[in-house]
Amino acid sequence: MNVNQTVQPSRIESSSLYNPDLAPASKERRHWGTYNFAALWVSMSVNILTYMLAASLIQGGMNWRQAVATIFLGNVIVLVPMLLNSHPGAKYGIPFPVLARASFGVFGANIAAVLRALVACGWFGIQTWIGGEAISTLFAILVPAWKSFPHGDGACFIIFWLINLAVVLKGIEYIRILQGISAPILLGVGLLLLVWAYTTAGGVGPMLSVPSRFTSFPDFLKFLIPALNGTVGFWATVSLNIPDFTRFARNQREQVIGQALALPTTMTLYAFVGIVVTSATVVIYGTAIWDPVQLLSRFHSPVAVVISLVAIVLATLNVNIGANVVSPANDFSNLWPRRISFRTGGIITCFMGIALMPWKLLSNYRTFILGWLGGYAAFLGPVAGILICDYFVIRRRELVLEDLYLRYGAYEYSRGFNWRAVIALVLGAGTALAGLIVDSVRALYDYSWFVGFAVSFVAYYAMMSRE
């Protein structure tokens, strides 16, 4: 029997904690199968940031084998919390902010939701900056005088931001035509870059000949640890809000198989493109170029560059709306369900994307991996630890669905807040961030997602077991 049949719609619909966007998915809406979840990960994994993540490992000093292995291992690791958090979404049809009410309380869930939403806003800004950069490069090719225009990248960032905002205001159905072609578009750009690298570098041998810059295993570990942590952190956001998608699953088996097949393989395959091409740039230019837009600007064929840049702009728009607006819009809606709709939440996301200054987050590979990915992993790892401990260990996969939408029910705790979850979150994040302050325990920050997850999991279990 569908769990939603135990819910009395009239009762929860009158609650201040309810709106249609946060409601349990009805049986009619649960039609996602294995193919849908595999396609979801193909469309989300094949994007410019996957390329840049992989390319940053080459720029950091790895050879191509080390970089491929790091990407694959990191995505196999993050698949575990991804599938664990997928379970309640598929079983109860609820999105992430509603699931968080079970552990953090009906109001305390806003803490977890806002943390996750702010990270998504940062990703929105990063993708928007990349799209704007592509537009600026395109202008420079079509109108050479644009190169001397002051603040050209910033102006094009605003242009692309306005395009994203227009899609949010009109409704995401206006971009559905791009949903099925964004991945093929970027695969085409990747193939173009591979062909260019092959012909310009002089074949596969030279392309993959760049050696590791690490002279000893301890030196390699110093970069591997934060790189692996950053690779896990890359999908730390989606590993939390994956119930936003699995709530539409037909059953548990299909969502598990679809994700397990597509996530590690697609990420590794498209990352391989970034790794190989970036290795080739070391041979061709004497330095690693990790930004594909900057690399395309060096091409001598205007037609190929224009087509590639237009493709990047269209695909980035699609990925940005699908991956970086849908979830934070739900999270912000959870703050005030009666006043903040999905559309309003999307508008908030757009403005926060500017406030987080994405141009600084992409200033170099160290800021991207160590600062951005490692920094927010210190907060999202603890949230994942608390959610998984609560659902699988404390509650044994059983939730009172109605009470997730009601005041003074099973998840009221102390005036809507479960302070034990909040304390566990602070302990986990604080322990991970201690590595930024005390050099002798730098490893705590280098492993921020893992450390935060473990500390918060144990702390939450210890405090909840005393009931």
Image (spheres, rainbow, N blue to C red):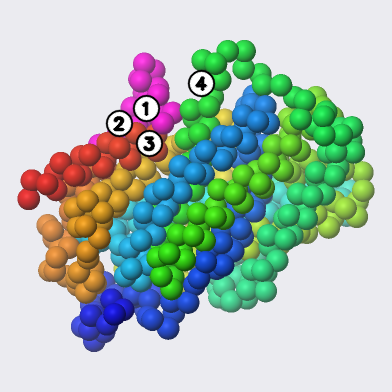
CA neighbours of label 3 inside 10 A, class few (<14), some (14 to 19), many (20+): many
CA neighbours of label 4 inside 10 A, class few (<14), some (14 to 19), many (20+): few
Lower position in the chain sequence, tag 4 or tag 3: 4
Q: What's under tag 2, amino acid-wise?
A: Thr
CA neighbours of label 1 inside 10 A, class few (<14), some (14 to 19), many (20+): many
Question: Does the stretch in magenta take in 427?
Answer: yes
CA neighbours of label 2 inside 10 A, class few (<14), some (14 to 19), many (20+): many
Q: For mark 4, what is the residue?
A: 222
Q: Secondary structure at mark 2?
A: helix
What's the CA distance linking mark 1 and mark 3?
Answer: 9 Å
Q: What's under tag 1, amino acid-wise?
A: Leu
Q: Which residues are magenta?
A: 426-447
Q: Residue 421: x, y in percent? A: 21, 48
Lower position in the chain sequence, tag 1 or tag 3: 1
Q: Secondary structure at mark 1?
A: helix
What's the CA distance linking mark 2 and mark 3?
Answer: 11 Å
For the image, the number of numbered tags is 4
Picture residue at 17% right of the left edge, 47% below the top: 420
Lower position in the chain sequence, tag 2 or tag 3: 2
The single residue placed furthest to the top in the displayed view is 215
Q: For mark 2, what is the residue?
A: 431
